[in-house]
Structures are given as structure tokens and as C-alpha cells.
Amino acid sequence: GVQIDKLAASLRARWLQRRGEEAAVPEGGYLGAYVTDLAAEVEDALDPPALDRLRSGERDTQLQVLRDWAVDRLRQEQDRDLRAFGVTFDAYYTESRLYAEGHVQETLDELRERGLVYEAEGAIWLRTSEYGDDKDRVLLKSDGTYTYFLPDLAYHREKARRGFEHVIDVWGADHHGYVPRMKAALEALGLQDFLDVEIVQMVRILRGG
């Protein structure tokens, strides 16, 4: 997704800086010290073929190597944090997998077949207002890129296809406005009452404090 692309570009800039080359973190990129820390460890962490690709000098190749490594590295760190307060995941399902396996495009195709989308202002819109949302939502922007909404919908659709009958999502309070549109979109796909969402506030957890 867009945020991972920004992470890769930010990491590449810090990695190039460590090599004495001129580079700047892109606008909207990540400026945290942890990106600099990642840049300091990436060469030692990569296997020889990946390291050769990183040093190839081709920007797109470098970004792909850094993207793949950083996602895996940060997920391992998140795993450790989760285990520290007793939460474990049996499996991960990445957004990139949704694209690679064609689920995002399949979801858009199904919505088209059902007559649930239309084009306006150069974008593709989903008729969520017909299913309880306060307005229709953009799936494909006028610049040809997907909104976050479409891969999120594709994930839930694929989960139903894998045999899940009911899903409980845990979302941060900053996403509460996202609930009606997701439920509306799932209902449009024939998945009424498929999703329940638990909204939680951000908290600080202390152990023994």
C-alpha cells in the first residue's frame, strides 16, 4: 500500500545517506529514528542475493528489496510486542497478497457485475448509500489508484470465500466512521450480518506498575 511505499522510500533515503550519498526522505515519508536504525542493520540482515540486488543501483529494485525486508522485520517486532501482553496470531494475511492473488480486481469485477458501481468525476464509486451508508464511496480514484476501501472489502470478501461465517474486527476509535460503509458494502455483496466491529480506544498498558 501507499504507506509501505513511503516506508521503503524513507528507508532507501536513510540507507543512501549512510553510504555517503545525497538523498532526502520524500515528502510525507517517515522521519522517525527507527527508520535510521533499520538502515543501519539492513545490509547485515539481507541474504547475499538480496544484498546484491540492493547494491545494484536500480531504484525500483532497491525499493522492492527494502520494502520486503522492512515489512518482515517490523512484523517480527510487532509479534514480540503482542506476545509481551499475551496476544498471538495464527496467521497473517498481507495486503500485497490480495493484489498478487487477484482478489482486489475480482471484487471490483463482482461489484460491476452486480450493477453496484458507477463512474463519476473520473472515479469509480460504490453505491453504499443504497445499503445504509450516508453517501456513496470511491473505490478507484481518477488517477487510477485504488482507495483503501477496496482492498479492505476484498479481504472480507475473500474471508467469506474461505469459509468464515462471521467475522469480528477490532478497530481503533479513529476508524469508527469506517464501520457503516464496510457493512454496507458487505451487504451489497450478499454478506449481511457477516461483520461485527469492536471499537477500542488507544491505551497504555503497564505490567506491575
Image: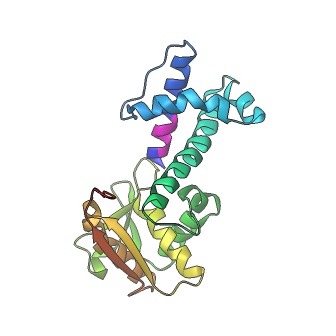
| In the image, farthest residue toward the right | 49
Residue found at x 40% / y 73%: 169
Q: Quadrant of residue 203?
A: bottom left
Q: Position of residue 189 (x, y in %)?
A: 45, 81
Could you tell me residue 177's position as x and y percent?
A: 25, 66
Q: Residue furthest front?
A: 208
Give the camera-side residue of 41 and 192: 41
Q: Taking 178 as reference, is 163 above or below it? A: below
- Judge left or right: residue 27 versus residue 74: left
- Which color scheme does this rendered protein use? rainbow
Q: Is residue 153 left or right of residue 160?
A: left
Task: Kindly identify the residue that appears in the image at 34 percent across and 73 percent down.
Answer: 127
Give the residue drawn at x 42%, y 29%.
26
The x, y position of residue 162, in whole percent, is 60, 80
Numbered range of the magenta stretch: 4-8
Residue 183 painted magenta? no
**How many numbered tags mark residues here?**
0
The answer to whether 81 is drawn above or below residue 115 in the figure is above
Q: Does the magenta stretch mainly form a helix, a strand or a loop?
A: helix
Name which residue lies at 58% across and 84% down.
163
Quadrant containing the C terminus is bottom left
Left or right: residue 191 compared with residue 203: right
Toward the left, the furthest residue is 134
Residue 82, image x, y percentages: 46, 59
